[in-house]
Image (cartoon, rainbow, N blue to C red):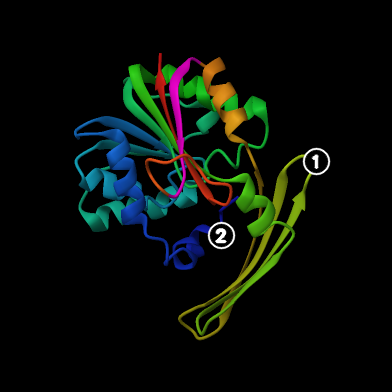
Amino acid sequence: MYTDFSDVYDRLMRDVDYEAWAARYARMLGTAPLRITECACGTGAITVPLARAGYAVTGVDLSGDMLEKAMVRARSAGVDIPFIRQDMRKLTTARRQDAVLATCDGINYLTDEKSVKAFFTSAAGCLKPGGKLLMDFSSAYKLEHILGSNTLTLDEEDAAYIWTNTWHGKSRLVDLDLCIFIKDPSGGFRRVRECQTQRAHTEAEIGAWLDECGFRDVRFSGSRENEAPGETDERIFVSAVLA
C-alpha cells in the first residue's frame, strides 16, 4: 500500500488544514517540550508542525515511500525529526514517551479487534506512567454514509480521479478503490491505482479495548473540541491516559 500513491498523496490532500489539525493535537498534548511518537505519520504533514511547536517528535509509518516524503518535508521546514519504518501494531521506542499519537485514520486501517488491541498494547509499553494515547479516526457515519458504496470524482486541469467505494454492512468494512491521473512535466498523465480497506470502529469498541489494554480517563470529541461527537460528525478524536 502507498508505494506509488505517496507521489500524489499530498497533491490530493492539499485542501486539508494540517496546521489546524496539528494545533488541536498540541492543545491535547499540553505544554511542550514533550517526547512523542506519531504513528501512521504518512508524509509528515502533522509531524512537522508538532516539531516546529517544540515537541520532540518521532514519526513512524509502515510505508517507506511515505517516510521518504516526510523526510523531505522536514528538511524543507528546517526541523530534525527521526522517521522510522515500523508497524504500529508492534511499536517500540528507545525511550519511554510522554505521548503516542495515531493520526489521520491510522486505526481505521487496523481492521479487526486483534490488530487494534495489538497497537494499544504496544503503545502502552512505550509510554511513561500517566502518558497519553491520542488518536483520530473516521467515524462510522462517515464510512457508511459519506464514503459508503458511493463513487467520488475529481476533474481538474492537472489531476483527476475516480474513487469507488464498497461498503460491507455486516463487517463494517469499506473498500476504497482509487484510480488517479496526475499530469507530469512532459504534459502527459500518469495513472496511479490504490486499493485500501478501512473499518468503522465504534466509540464503545474503542473505549472497551482501551480499558482492556490498561488505559483510563478515555475521552471522545468530535468537530467541537470540548463536546462529545455528534451523530453526523465525520471525525472522532480520542484521548486516553495510561494507568
Boundaries of the magenta span: 214-223
List x then y, in percent, for residue 59. Answer: 37, 40
The label on residue 4 is 2
Residue 154 is left or right of residue 8, and the answer is: right
Secondary element at image label 2: loop
Q: Nearer the viewer, mark 1 or mark 2?
A: 1
Magenta part, dominant SS: strand
Is the residue 2 above or below the residue 30 in the image?
A: below
Q: Position of residue 74 (x, y in %)?
A: 29, 51
**Left/right of residue 204 with respect to residue 96 in the rendered view:** right
First of labels 1, 2 by sequence position: 2
Q: How many dots with numbers?
A: 2
Name the quadrant containing residue 205: top right
Label annotation for residue 126: none
Please tell me whether residue 97 is drawn above or below residue 145 in the rendered image: above
Q: Residue at x 45, y 43 (%)?
A: 103
**Which secondary structure lies at badge 1?**
loop
Whether label 1 touches label 2, CB < 8 Å: no
Residue 72 visible to the viewer: no
Q: CA gap, disc 1 to disc 2?
A: 31 Å
Q: Which mark is residue 170?
A: 1
Q: Residue placed at 32% from the left, 32% from the top?
A: 36
What amino acid is found at the position of numbered circle 2 in the picture?
A: Asp
